[in-house]
Image (cartoon, rainbow, N blue to C red):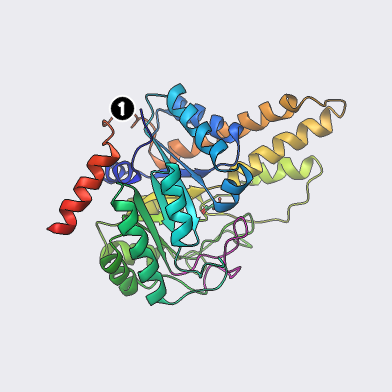
């Protein structure tokens, strides 16, 4: 099946009351790990690429790997999503390449670091919505500022300094027409999210519930949702790594979010940890090895396991055959009709 619209995937997730993991990729092994996990658990899939990933893979390598995935896994509905577009140009170039969904992160200026104004965010996101919807492509916006830095993108603040304001979120959705909304509730990108297991003081699930009450029909997106499991940290440290003790977002909090409007759950760090641990183990135990497959295979397998587990925990497992994909042209027609109404 061709790459599908993220709007359709998230609408279906809302109907079924489940969340969909959005996993970041840079290379072939990561795409293979996700697709194998999806086949095993019978899950629809969102694969996302940051600007850094697009530049690392020269764009077209990544895009053609995704096309290969649609050929090899034709039964699986699959979205290719631009993670944290920093400008309308970045989003438009993703759409031109064939991405079926883009995130316009107008919470920051195009430098990807400086928090922007509400007016700038609305104007830039609206411009992307117009360009994307004309092609049937989905748009995720962001209001509030997430913590941390991902692939060079981020204000580098802690997760609590620019929490999403529910009134502003409602106004933003009304003015921009985004399909999905990333919110800041205390999470941040990367491994170092919390210095101890988060409580209501550091991870503001009450804020998320308030936003969902204001916007019951908007698909919410939880960024920075890796759980940073201790087992994965331990493997890295056991084989010569130097991670400081750290806590991620507990899966039960994500599941509470899913009960309250979260439909897209962004996970990158857990996959990175799984891959790194597996590679370190081979390097330590078999220092004589020099065939890249000897460590890339276990790395791919370690990522497959973590992705399959998350797909099951988020509830997307078993939903692969629930619906036929709506072509992007048909999505574009629906958006035109909606805006004319
Ligand atoms: P993690 O660093 O928690 O995996 O978050 C990834 C993310 O939000 C990508 O946008």
**Residue 65: in magenta span:** no
Residue 189's quadrant in the figure?
A: bottom right
In the depicted structure, whether residue 23 falls above or below residue 173: above
Q: Position of residue 90 (x, y in %)?
A: 48, 56
Query: Residue 308: x percent and y percent?
Result: 50, 33
Residue 231 visible in the shown view: no
**Is residue 46 positioned above or below 282 on the image?**
below
- Look at 50% across and 37% down and name the residue there: 63
Look at the image and tell me in which quarter the C terminus lies: bottom left
Q: Please state if 191 lies on the left or on the right of 290 as rendered.
A: left
**Horizontally, is 301 left or right of 312 in the view?**
right
Residue at x 78%, y 46% (from the top left corner) = 241
In percent of width and height, residue 17 lies at 29, 44
The secondary structure that dominates the magenta segment is loop
On-image quarter of the N terminus = top left
Q: Please tell me how many numbered marks the rendered image carries.
A: 1
- The residue range painted magenta reads 144-160
Label 1, on which residue?
A: 321
């Amino acid at each position: 099946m061709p790459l599908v619209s993220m709007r359709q995937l998230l609408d279906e997730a809302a109907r079924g009351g489940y969340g969909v993991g959005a996993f970041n990729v840079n290379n072939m092994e990561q795409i293979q790990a996700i697709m194998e996990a999806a086949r095993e658990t019978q899950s629809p899939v969102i694969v996302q690429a940051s600007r850094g990933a697009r530049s690392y893979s020269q764009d077209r390598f990544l895009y053609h790997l995704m096309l290969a995935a649609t050929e090899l896994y034709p039964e699986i509905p699959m979205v290719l999503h631009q993670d944290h577009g920093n400008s309308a140009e970045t989003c438009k170039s993703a759409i031109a390449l064939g991405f079926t969904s883009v995130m316009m992160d107008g919470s920051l200026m195009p430098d990807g670091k400086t928090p922007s104004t509400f007016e700038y965010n609305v104007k830039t996101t609206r411009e992307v919505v117009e360009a994307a919807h004309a092609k049937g492509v989905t748009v995720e916006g962001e209001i509030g500022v997430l913590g941390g830095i991902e692939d060079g993108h981020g204000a580098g603040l802690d997760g609590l300094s620019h929490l999403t304001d529910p009134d502003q979120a409602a106004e933003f959705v009304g003015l921009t027409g985004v399909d999905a909304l990333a919110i800041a509730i205390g999470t941040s990108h990367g491994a170092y999210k919390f210095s101890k297991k988060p409580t209501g003081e550091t991870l503001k699930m009450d804020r998320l519930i308030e936003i969902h009450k204001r916007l019951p029909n908007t698909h919410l997106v939880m960024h920075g949702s890796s759980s940073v499991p201790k087992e994965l940290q331990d493997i890295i440290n056991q084989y010569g790594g130097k991670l400081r003790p750290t806590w991620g977002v507990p899966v039960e909090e994500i599941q509470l979010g899913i009960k309250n409007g979260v439909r897209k759950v962004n996970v990158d760090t857990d996959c990175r940890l799984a891959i790194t641990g597996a590679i370190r183990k081979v390097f330590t135990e078999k220092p004589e090895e020099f065939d890249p497959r000897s460590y890339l295979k276990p790395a791919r397998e370690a990522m497959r396991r973590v992705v399959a587990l998350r797909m099951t925990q988020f509830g997307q497992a078993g939903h692969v055959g629930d619906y036929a994909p709506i072509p992007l042209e048909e999505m574009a027609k629906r958006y035109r009709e909606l805006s004319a109404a």
